[in-house]
Image (cartoon, rainbow, N blue to C red):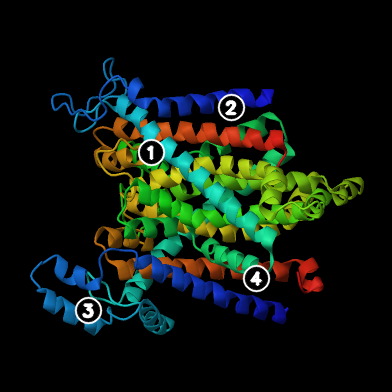
């Protein structure tokens, strides 16, 4: 646990910034200031300003809220849905299990990002639809893991004992199976946080996620790429923000896997 | 062996049917249909005209009838016509496909050229300085989104140093290098990790000790025995990463104005050309599934254990 601490703290700092973003911004992230557009980083605007003169530092902090919190909710939803479906399928077995897993196989056969791009486009874009399309394509991975773990745990003696002593299915799932399959799921989810952040930002970069004027990092880079030559700081700031955030969550996930010894 | 391949091909059928169903269903989630698209922009057509057109196109039929009609045509590779250009979407797709194939092939080649030697070195020098440096860079590469890498490369190599054309030039060989390099950064990072881990576990196997005891040089052990046995796993790895490559290509092609199917799809999205998008999703998924099938069969052919064992 000690080894995890620095990683937990750095992830905690990012989550803190994300949650309290509105109180941490030095300027209003949406306030336009036509007299100070495209300013390079300086003492008043630490990361400079964008084409509308909005303070980039404030927008990066605000963006932490949009990008990080939505990515975390995607990862949590995907893993919860996947675990419920997978544990149910594994526990119940038979035809229902077969059907659920075949449906999952079909979703796994799509290239993830291709599916997410198309689905969020058809739904008309927006952060919610982008998040939804990632959830729709990503659940089978968790369902598979949860299912195989559930099947393994179901064969154990304590589950047999619980069945003999008259435990209901729901209770056995909740009290005996879930607690025993949760660690690998947590590690998988942690490893996915970085990928989901990049996926959501990528969709916003294509104009399929958060819409202007939202201070979402991918969206900011989408706007900024038109000014690459004259004002590279516009894409540099959100790019580095994504990089640091993903790096922090990736290293936390790596350590978590080592500590929990999940393979 | 033949039986195994046949079995795999049969297993492929329900998957592909499922792909068509989900793709078709997904496209129906849109609030606009073909008729809205045809007349919506001009705004001129009366409700009556639009209704007649809907009848003519079969859009008033039930979901299942529409699906089966679509499937019937799709079997003959007719995915309908583009809302925008009016041309058959499949022809347009085929037209752009070689560009994307070139892009993904070059980035795969780049990835393997860099990650195989680096992964092997990192494993051999486990916990040494070189290993730490290689792992550090692979960690960084793994945390960089591809669109950021692409923009950085354009900024430094094209705008500042003038080494590469800024965008496009889809036909020149220099044109493919930057987008391919962009796509391979994250992949190289992942491959290095995998190859390092695979090599480490291989080096711990008893036959390696045996080879060392017989005085076989480390070089031969590494490049003849270890590389041979991990290359099997590499085949699976490469086939699986085609999925993320194709997804990444949509973003990278847009950044570099590379005229492949990914940019085609993003353009289709901006113009709400849903038949085009539908063909893109379905074709790429089928390509992905088939590549993985081929890798699976190849694995069987190359691995004597699977070959002799028959059913694995």
- Which label's residue is closer to the chain start, 1 or 3? 3
Q: Mark 4 points at which residue?
A: A95
The mark tally for this picture is: 4
Q: On what subunit does the disc labeled 3 rest?
A: B
Q: Can residue B169 be seen in this view?
A: yes
Pick out the residue farthest to the front.
A166
**Residue B152 disc label:** 1
* Marks 1/4: CA–CA distance: 51 Å
Q: How far apart are marks 3 and 4 (CA)?
A: 40 Å
Where, by quadrant of the figure, is residue A95 drawn? bottom right
Inter-mark Cα distance, 1 to 3: 48 Å
**Distance in Å between CA atoms under marks 4 and 2:** 43 Å
Front label number (4 vs 2): 4
Q: Do labels 1 and 3 share a chain?
A: yes
Q: Going from the N terminus, do you reach mark 4 or mark 2 first?
A: 2
Give the label, 1 or 3, closer to the camera.
3
User: Disc 4 is attached to a residue of which chain?
Assistant: A
**What residue is shown at x 69% (from left), y 58% (from top)?**
A91
Number of the label disc, if any, that sits on residue B54:
3
Quadrant placement of the C terminus of chain B: bottom right
Element assignment for label 2: helix
How far from the left and from the top, in percent, is residue A60? 35, 29
The quadrant where residue B67 appears: bottom left
């Amino acid at each position: 646990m000690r080894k995890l601490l620095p990683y937990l703290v750095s992830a905690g700092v990012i989550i803190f910034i994300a949650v309290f973003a509105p109180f941490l911004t030095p300027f209003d992230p949406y306030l336009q200031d036509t007299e100070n557009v495209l300013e390079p980083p300086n003492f008043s605007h630490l990361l400079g300003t964008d084409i509308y003169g909005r303070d980039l530092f404030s927008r990066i902090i605000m963006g932490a809220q949009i990008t990080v919190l939505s990515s975390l909710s995607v990862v949590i939803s995907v893993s919860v849905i996947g675990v419920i479906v997978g544990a149910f399928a594994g526990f119940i077995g038979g035809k229902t299990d077969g059907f659920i897993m075949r449906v999952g196989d079909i979703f796994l056969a799509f290239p993830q990002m291709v599916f997410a791009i198309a689905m969020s486009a058809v739904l008309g874009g927006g952060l919610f639809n982008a998040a939804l399309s990632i959830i729709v394509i990503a659940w089978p991975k968790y369902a598979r893991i949860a299912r195989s773990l559930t099947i393994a745990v179901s064969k154990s003696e304590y589950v047999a004992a619980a069945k003999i002593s008259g435990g209901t299915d729901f209770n056995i799932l909740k009290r005996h199976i879930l607690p025993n399959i949760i660690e690998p799921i947590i590690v998988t989810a942690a490893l996915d946080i970085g990928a989901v952040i990049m996926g959501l930002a990528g969709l916003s970069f294509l104009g399929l996620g958060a819409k202007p004027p939202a201070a979402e990092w991918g969206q900011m880079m989408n706007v900024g790429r038109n000014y690459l030559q004259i004002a590279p700081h516009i894409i540099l700031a959100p790019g580095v923000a994504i990089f640091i955030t993903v790096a922090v969550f990736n290293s936390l996930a790596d350590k978590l896997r080592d500590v929990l010894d999940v393979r | 062996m033949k039986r195994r391949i046949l079995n795999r091909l049969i297993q492929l059928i329900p998957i592909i049917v499922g792909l068509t169903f989900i793709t078709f269903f997904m496209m129906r989630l849109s609030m606009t249909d073909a008729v809205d698209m045809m007349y919506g922009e001009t705004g001129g057509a009366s409700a009556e005209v639009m209704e007649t057109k809907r009848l003519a196109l079969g859009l008033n039929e039930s979901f299942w009838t529409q699906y089966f009609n679509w499937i019937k045509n799709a079997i003959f590779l007719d995915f309908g016509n583009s809302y925008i250009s009016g041309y058959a979407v499949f022809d347009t797709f085929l037209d752009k496909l070689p560009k994307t194939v070139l892009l993904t092939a070059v980035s795969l080649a780049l990835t393997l050229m860099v990650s195989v030697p680096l992964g092997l070195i990192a494993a051999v020098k486990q916990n040494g300085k070189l290993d730490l440096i290689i792992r550090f860079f692979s960690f960084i590469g793994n945390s960089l989104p591809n669109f950021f890498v692409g923009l950085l490369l354009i900024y430094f190599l094209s705008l500042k140093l003038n080494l590469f054309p800024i965008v496009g030039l889809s036909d020149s060989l220099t044109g493919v290098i930057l987008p391919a390099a962009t796509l391979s950064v994250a992949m190289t990072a992942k491959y290095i990790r995998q190859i390092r881990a695979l090599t480490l576990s291989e080096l711990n196997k008893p036959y390696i000790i045996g080879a060392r005891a017989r005085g076989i040089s480390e070089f031969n052990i590494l490049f003849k025995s270890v590389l041979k046995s991990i290359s099997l796993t590499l085949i699976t790895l490469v086939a699986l990463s085609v999925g993320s490559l194709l997804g990444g290509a949509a973003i990278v092609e847009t950044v570099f104005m590379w005229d492949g199917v990914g940019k085609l799809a993003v353009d289709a999205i901006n113009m709400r050309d849903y038949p085009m998008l539908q063909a893109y999703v379905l074709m790429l998924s089928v390509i992905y599934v088939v590549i993985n099938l081929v890798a699976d069969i190849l694995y069987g052919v190359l691995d004597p254990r699977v070959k002799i064992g028959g059913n694995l």
